[in-house]
Amino acid sequence: MNPTDLALALLANTAWAFNFIAGKAGVSHFPPLLFSSLRFGMLLLLLFPFLRWIPGQMKSVITLGFVLGIFHFGLIFLGLEAAGDVSSVAIVAQLYVPFSALLAVVFLGEKLGWRRILGISCAFSGVLVIGFDPLVFQHLDALFFTTAAALVMAIATVMMRRLQGVPVFTLQAWIAVIAAPGMLVLTLLLESGQVQALETADWLNFAAPAYSAVGASMVGHGIVYYLLGRYPVSVTAPLMLLTPVLAVFFGVVFWGDTLTWKLLLGGLLTITGVAVITIRAPQQALVVPDEAKEDDGRSIPIGPEECSETER
């Protein structure tokens, strides 16, 4: 990979990693479901020109909009709101990679070698260690929400593998069509204080959902799909492992996270396990979160290791 594209890969990692900070800042002012509705509303406005009917696949796209847009993002922002830090959420969210590998065995008939089994065990062991960190232990609801969000993300990626030839921005636009009003209904039913939060919000508060929509979804994903059009998955995917590392760094620098030995050890185990799964996975062994297109129009399958959506 040439230096320019390496710089773009670093920018994508940075965009996804900082999304955890933006999300945590956003749900510190807005109720989490309202924040998610604002995020998808802004994304829909930006991606509306890409919205078009997808013959023969709309049922799958709409279902995916509910699974990914409503359940995954709802859970991840609930996790950020409940968490006492950013770092633990950024690390635990990576469980979608081992979850995806396990679901591929169950639903797609794939087989796991001993290295990937070891990687899966290592990743889950790391989360168990993180759970005993004093701060995380005081917010086990956040750990539950984030783990559930990772599982839902894995389910969504299995569903995405069945989509054919759907451009990434078109798919994201349809997810926003489902999620923006869906989250608005949920926040009206389940949350309170929305009017006060909107009335007291300043430009910096609104910058959080705006960044999540633009920085994570458009810039981050756009760069990755560009790189996948130029390089094999085996080259691009390992570079995306920088995302949780940068997220922890940003959590310490910008949010004041404290790195205890349990968080460091658990994070190391989890990221190492994810790395083993990601680097050794064949290009089509894992599931596909979206579709990218090469210049000649061919679809490029993308494994879960390339799509850290909250990060993404």
Image (tube, rainbow, N blue to C red):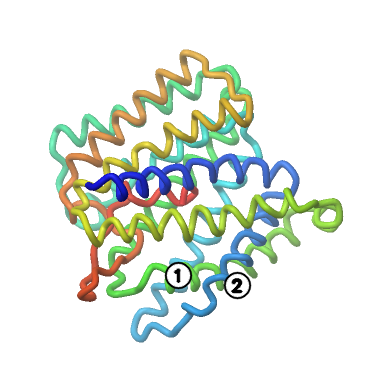
Please give left or right for residue 308 compared with residue 100 in the image: right
Residue 248 position within the rendered picture, expressed as x and y whole percent measured from the top left: 49, 30
> Which residue reaches farthest front?
3
Answer left or right for 271 relative to 188.
left
**Image position of 134 with respect to 105: above or below:** above
Q: Nearer the viewer, residue 189 or 309?
A: 309
Say which residue appears at 65% left-offset and 37% top-offset: 82
Tell me which amino acid carries mark 1: Thr
Disc 1 and disc 2 in contact, CB within 8 angstroms: no
Would you name the residue on which mark 2 appears? Answer: 45
What's under tag 2, amino acid-wise? Leu
Camera-side residue of 159 and 14: 14
Residue drawn at (49%, 35%), measured in percent from left and top?
Answer: 247
- Distance from disc 1 to disc 2, alpha carbons, whole Å, reads 21 Å
Q: Quadrant of residue 289?
A: bottom left
Q: Which residue is mark 1?
A: 63
Q: Nearer the viewer, residue 105 or 249?
A: 249
N-term-proximal mark, 1 vs 2: 2
Q: What is the x, y in percent for residue 159?
A: 34, 63
